[in-house]
Amino acid sequence: MTSARGSVRRQVTIARPPDEVWEAVGDPTRLAEWFPGIVSVTVDGDERTIVTGAGIPMPERILTVDPIQRRFQYRVTSSLFREHLGTIDVLALDDGTSLVVYSTDADPSVMALVIGGAAGDGLRALKHRMEANEGSP
């Protein structure tokens, strides 16, 4: 991490096939189903706005929704950030389960730490929902 730019990565294994996990992660409208603290999501084209439990709207631009690689990328466009890139990858493991990796790069660097902490919570919640509900978050 540099003083201006920060990078954080979190990951979790989920005992569900990657295509099932991708259904939840790859759909930009479903974030509130598995990410704690997000109360609503609206999508209009490549623009997504999430609203936090504190009522703060956070505008984003969807950059990549790739079902072949199972990769979702977005950029927070809020004035809190000079730059941001979030990437979520759903990877197939040899035993038929999934590895979900959430990476965030941000300037200012402190925002990478904030999102990284929230991403860890989100991945744990996704794992719990996917495994408890047999694939339905």
Image: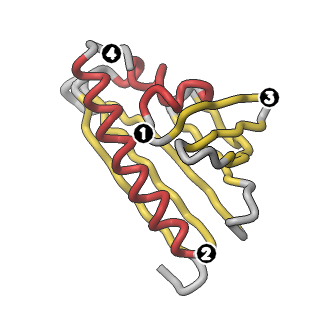
Q: Which residue is drawn at 36% across and 54% down?
A: 10
Asked if labels 2 and 4 touch by Cβ distance under 8 angstroms, the answer is: no
Q: Earlier in the sequence, mark 3 or mark 2?
A: 3
Q: What residue type is labelled 4?
A: Gly
Q: Which of marks 1 and 4 is nearer the N terminus?
A: 1
Q: Which of marks 4 and 2 is nearer the N terminus?
A: 2
Asked if labels 3 and 4 touch by Cβ distance under 8 angstroms, the answer is: no
Disc 3/disc 2 C-alpha distance (Å):
27 Å
Tag 3 residue: 44
Q: Which amino acid does label 3 sit on?
A: Asp
Tag 1 residue: 36
Disc 1/disc 2 C-alpha distance (Å):
23 Å
The relative height of residue 10 versus residue 12 in the rendered view (above or below) is below
Asked if labels 2 and 1 touch by Cβ distance under 8 angstroms, the answer is: no
Q: Residue at x 53, y 42 (%)?
A: 53
Q: Nearer the viewer, mark 1 or mark 3?
A: 1
Q: Nearer the viewer, mark 4 or mark 3?
A: 3
Disc 4/disc 3 C-alpha distance (Å):
27 Å
The relative height of residue 56 versus residue 116 in the rendered view (above or below) is above
Q: Where is residue 1 in the image (x, y as percent from the top left)?
A: 47, 79
Q: Earlier in the sequence, mark 1 or mark 3?
A: 1
Tag 2 residue: 108
- What's the mark number on residue 135? 4
Q: Which residue is drawn at 52% across and 84% down?
A: 2
Q: Which amino acid does label 2 sit on?
A: Pro
Q: What element carries label 3?
A: strand
